[in-house]
Amino acid sequence: MFIIQKRIGKFSAAHRIQGHPKCSFLHGHDFHVSIEIEYTEYLPSSGLVLDFALFAPLKDALLRYDHRTLLDFNDPLFLELHDSSVRTSLVQFAYPPTTECIAQRLFAEFKGLLWQRISRTVRLKSVTVLEGDGDGATFRE
Ligand SMILES: [Zn+2]
């Protein structure tokens, strides 16, 4: 078995976590995103499990989060901004936009993007999201 690692990229975004003593204030991070791919067969004669160019759509997907404000739609700030002229910068979450939740959301998005592009022997194993200082979370199915 091989585990292939790929740093997909980063995006800069604002968020806040309601109820948290410090993180409930709107603030921003550079969110660094990487993935692991699991390959369960013998190494092909090419010596490559897959071409890293395969991951270009994942990098493009991060643009939907770049320079945006990530908020739980239950957050009163979400409603206030949604009705204002800055609403196009909002990304709605159904839960607090922690690194855990961002990793889980990106896992689902990336899995969908990769579904038709990779074989049965290759699967998305994990998505890791780190805030600028290196704290973060990994989601695995
Ligand atoms: Zn934060």
Image (spheres, grey):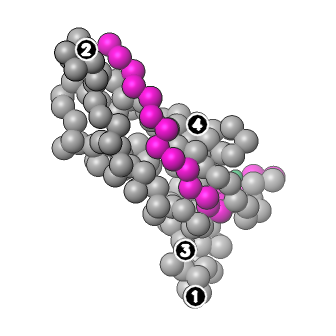
Amino acid of disc 4: Ala
* Bounds of the magenta segment: 1-21
For residue 7, which numbered disc appears in the image?
none
Which SS does the magenta portion mostly show?
strand
Marks 2 and 3 in Cβ contact (< 8 Å): no
Which mark is first along the chain, 2 or 4?
Answer: 2
Quadrant of the snapshot with the C terminus: top left
Residue corresponding to mark 1: 85
Q: Pinpoint residue 123: horizontal percent, then vertical percent.
A: 29, 30
Residue corresponding to mark 3: 89
Residue corresponding to mark 2: 43
Residue corresponding to mark 4: 137
| Figure label count | 4
In this rendering, position of residue 4 left or right of residue 94: left
Tell me the element at label 3.
helix
Q: CA distance from mark 2 to mark 1?
A: 53 Å
Q: CA distance from mark 3 to mark 4?
A: 24 Å
